[in-house]
Image: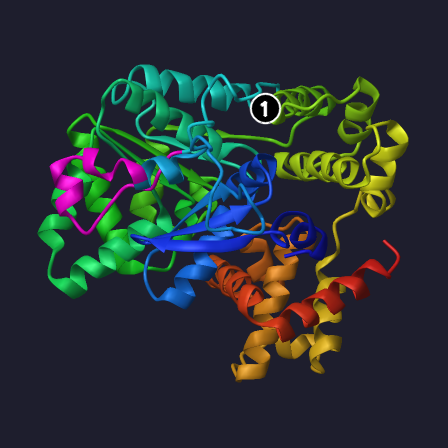
Amino acid sequence: MPRPNFETWLKGTQALRFDDETLVIGTENAFAATMLEERLAATISRAVERIAGQPVTVRFEVIADPANPTVPATREPTSELQADSSNRSSRSDLERESQFGSLPLNPRYTFDEFVVGPSNELAHAAATRAAAEPGRVYNPLYLYAGVGLGKTHLLQAIGNELKSRGMHLIYVSSERFTNDYIRSIQDGTTEQFRAFYRGADALLVDDIQFIAGKAQTQEGFFHTFNELHMGGKQVVVTGDEPARQSLLEERIQSRLEGGLVVDIQPPDYETRTAILREKVKVMQVQLPGDVLDVVASRPSSNVRELEGSLNRIVAYAQMTGAPVTVEVARKALGDLLNTRPEAPRTPSAVINAVSEQFGTDSETLKGPRRTKEVSLARHVAMYLLRETSALSSPQVGLALGGRDHSTVLYAQKKVEELIETDPELRSVIATIRQRLASQPR
C-alpha cells in the first residue's frame, strides 16, 4: 500500500491476540480503529489468511495503556466484523453446523447513509424497491460500476434492510462463493452446499466478474440462481461491467439481463460535496465549508478517493495540531492537488513503459510467448492498463494481442495479491508508475 497510508493508519498498530479465528489488532485511538475497519480490514485479513493458512477475521480495539497493550480500552463494536465474532451462538442451525457462511454486513451501509445524486439515483431507487419487495420486483437486480462508486454499499444496504425484517439472507463475494463451491466438491459436501445456498430468502453476490473463466463455479452459480429465482427468492448481483459485455457464460448473462440492470456513474461536484458532508458527520469532526470545497473541486472517479483525501486532511491536522484551514488542507493534499486531474494513459504508453522495465518489447507482450518472465510482464501490463488507461477488461485484452476478459481479470487479481507479498514487484510497479508520471500527457 502507499507509504502515507501505512504511516497514517498501520504504523501505530499492534497485534494483541488471536481468539477463535479472529486477530485482534490494537490501535492508538477510536478514529484509527474506525478508519482501519472501513478501509483496510479486507487487505489485512487477506494477508493474515495467507500466513495462518486458514480463514481469519480481524477486529480492532483501542489500546487503553500503550505501555501495557494487553489491556484494551472499552469500545463498542463499530462493524459487524466484531458483532459476527461475538454473536456466533445466535446463528441459524444450518449456518452454525455448516462449513459455509455468509460474510458479515457493515452496519453503516444503509440506505440512509447512501448519498443520492444524478449519477446513482436510479441504482438507489432500484435497490430500495428490491429491498421493499424482495423476489417480486427487479429480480434479479444487477448493479454495475467501477471501483469505489457505491455498488457494494447498495448491495449491503439491501442486506441490512432484509436482515432487519428477520429474513435469512446470504451475502458473499464471488471469491467466497467460488471457495465454498470448490470445497464442497473436494470434501464431498455438495448436498450441504446446495442446502445452505438454496435455503436463503435472498442471495447477494458481490463482484460477480471474478467467476468468469471458472466453468465449474459458473455451473454452481447457474443452478443456485435458477433454484432461488424459481422459488421467488431475491437475487442481487454486482459487477464491474454490463452483463452482456462480461465474459460470464451466455446463460448467466441472459439470467442477469432478465431482471433489471443498472449502472452507477462517477459523482458530480454537488454529489461529491454531499458525500463529504456526510463523511464529516460520521467522523464527528468539524471542517469549514471552504475546506470541503477544496476536496470536492478535485475531479474524482470514485468515492474512496474522496474519503482518502478527507482522511488525509484530518490526520495531517491531528498530527500537526494545526486548525483545519484551506491552507492546511492544501498542504495535506499536496501532491494530489498537483497531479489532478489525470488524463488516462494511452495503451501504447503503458505497454512501452512495462516493456522497457522488464527488458522486452511490446510485440512480445502482445504475442504468444508464455515464459515466466514474459507472463509476469504481461500480467503487470494488464494490471496497469486497468489502473491508468480507463479501459474495460475486454479492451485491455484486445490491446495485448486479443486475450480474453477472464485472463485480464485473473492477471489483475494475481498482481494485486503479489503486490501485498512481494517487495521487489512492488518496487518494479512503483518505478513504472514513476516513469509514466514523468511522461507528457
Where residue 107 sits, quadrant-wise, is top left
Return the x and y of residue 169 as percentages of the image width and height. Answer: 25, 31
Q: Residue at x 80, y 28 (%)?
A: 297
Where residue 11 sits, quadrant-wise, is bottom right
Return the x and y of residue 395 as percentages of the image width and height. Answer: 59, 54
Residue 241 visible in rendering: no
Q: Residue at x 48, y 42 (%)?
A: 61
Rendered view: 198 above or below 247: above
319 vs 368, nearest the viewer: 319
Indicate yes or no whether the magenta region holds residue 99: yes
Element under disc 1 = helix
Return the x and y of residue 439 as percentages of the image width and height. Answer: 86, 61
Q: Which residues are magenta?
A: 86-105
Dividing the image into 4 quarters, which one contains the N terminus?
bottom right
Rendered view: 262 above or below 205: above
Residue at image mark 1: 282
Q: Residue at x 64, y 37 (%)?
A: 302
Density class for disc 1 (Cα within 10 Å; few <14, some 14-19, many ≥20) is: few
How many numbered discs, if any? Answer: 1
Residue 354 visible in rendering: yes
Type of colouring: rainbow
Indicate yes or no whether the magenta region holds residue 182: no
Q: Amino acid at mark 1?
A: Val
295 vs 227, nearest the viewer: 295
Q: Residue at x 17, y 61 (%)?
A: 185
In screen coordinates, is 124 left or right of 356?
A: left
290 vs 320, nearest the viewer: 320
Rendered view: 84 above or below 373: above
